[in-house]
Amino acid sequence: MKLLWKLLRQHVSVPQLIGFFLANLAGMWIVMLGVQFYNDLAPMFTRDDGFFGANYIVVSKRISTVSTLSGSSQEFSDEEISELSAAPFSNGVGRFTSSQYKVTATMGLKGNPALSTELFFEAVPDSFVEVSPSDWHYEEGSRTLPVILPRTYLALYNFGFAASRGLPRVSDAMASQIEMRILIHAQGGTEPFTGRVIGFSSRLNTILVPQSFITWSNNTFDPGKESGATRLIVRVANPADQAIPIFMDNHGYDVEDNRLDAGKATYFLRIVVTLVTGVGLLVCVLSFYILMLSIYLLVQKNTRKLQNLLLIGYSPQRVSMPYQLLTLGINAAVLIIAILLLLPLRAWYMKMVSLVFPQVQGSGLWGSIVVGLCIFLVVTIFNFFAIHRKVNALKRG
């Protein structure tokens, strides 16, 4: 084999092989980057909330200029709730119950207060909250209160207070480290509580506490005052059911959910990745033709030598092997270098993404590596087949 390669390598065009190497490297790297980018960012739009699954929607009455001027109530009546419960897409309806008293809270980390504000609590039936009962439970008289915060609070802390005061940023995994001091202002004074943050929700823009606490605290701190539900949480069989928007439009309801926007974002992300991947595949195809042209020219220059080798008993497979091993080595080098080039770029854009979406961890490199291996195998197999076919043509000639 060594002597055979010395005989056949005399007309190898190094510039042509470098051109194929660079073109194939660019194409494979673009394809792997597109796949990796999609795998890393798609979960931002498609993942479940963690506390509320994809089969929950939040419904409120539509606010318009006419409804505001007419002073029409934004509360749901019992008849409206019954009608929504009886809708074909509905598997259950729960009411939002609001606190009837004034609440102030101070939040911070490691003894450093960062955010102090007035707020209010809301609760939904515990069956709608996908949390372990041991975590989502309040005993009457306890001073520790489990709380689910909206994710906008996390972004406000990370990019507002933490950035300006040199405080550490907080991720979802660090939720339990947040210190939350709560003061309920009742008629007879103030009552202190300690909030135990168990996580963040991107589905509900409210501070959620257990239903048992809202019931107890309303009866204790502001007895005799009741208000209707202005928002409802609905468990649906299929959030994509076309009957849902039709029903809501006919009744003047709004669905307070970002699932539609997330679906649009995922759709456009998929389009962009498809275009980028298509460009990469086109470059790979062009690089394949560059290599085939180089091999064909090389075989053409070595026609007399190849024919002599075939005439003295060398098989077409053995004559083809030096060229096949050459393409195999180039394709393997392309795959390895493409992976090595992907690592620093992914680390860079994931660092940028983590500043905006701290909860995104990425999906690992296996998806893009598998795609790269598939391209490597397809290109190598086609190279082997084309070279063997060309050598066989010389034998028949």
Image (cartoon, rainbow, N blue to C red):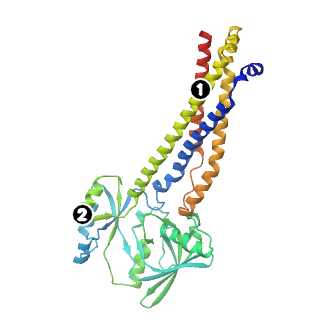
Q: Amino acid at mark 2?
A: His
Res 188 quadrant in image: bottom left
Q: Is residue 24 shown above or below 99?
A: above
Is residue 280 left or right of 251 when viewed as pictured?
right
Q: Which residue is mark 1?
A: 293
As helix, strand or loop, the secondary structure at mark 2 comes to helix
The percent position of residue 351, horizontal first and vertical second, equals 60, 59
The percent position of residue 31, horizontal first and vertical second, equals 55, 42
Is residue 375 left or right of 184 when viewed as pictured?
right
Residue 123 seen in the figure: yes
Residue name at image x 48 percent, y 60 percent: 50
Along the viewing direction, whichever of 268 and 180 lies nearer the viewer: 268
**Dot 2 or dot 1, earlier in sequence:** 2
Q: Which residue is mark 2?
A: 251
The percent position of residue 264, horizontal first and vertical second, equals 40, 54
Residue name at image x 28 percent, y 65 percent: 253
Along the viewing direction, whichever of 84 and 389 lies nearer the viewer: 389
Along the viewing direction, whichever of 54 and 389 lies nearer the viewer: 389
Along the viewing direction, whichever of 76 and 12 lies nearer the viewer: 12
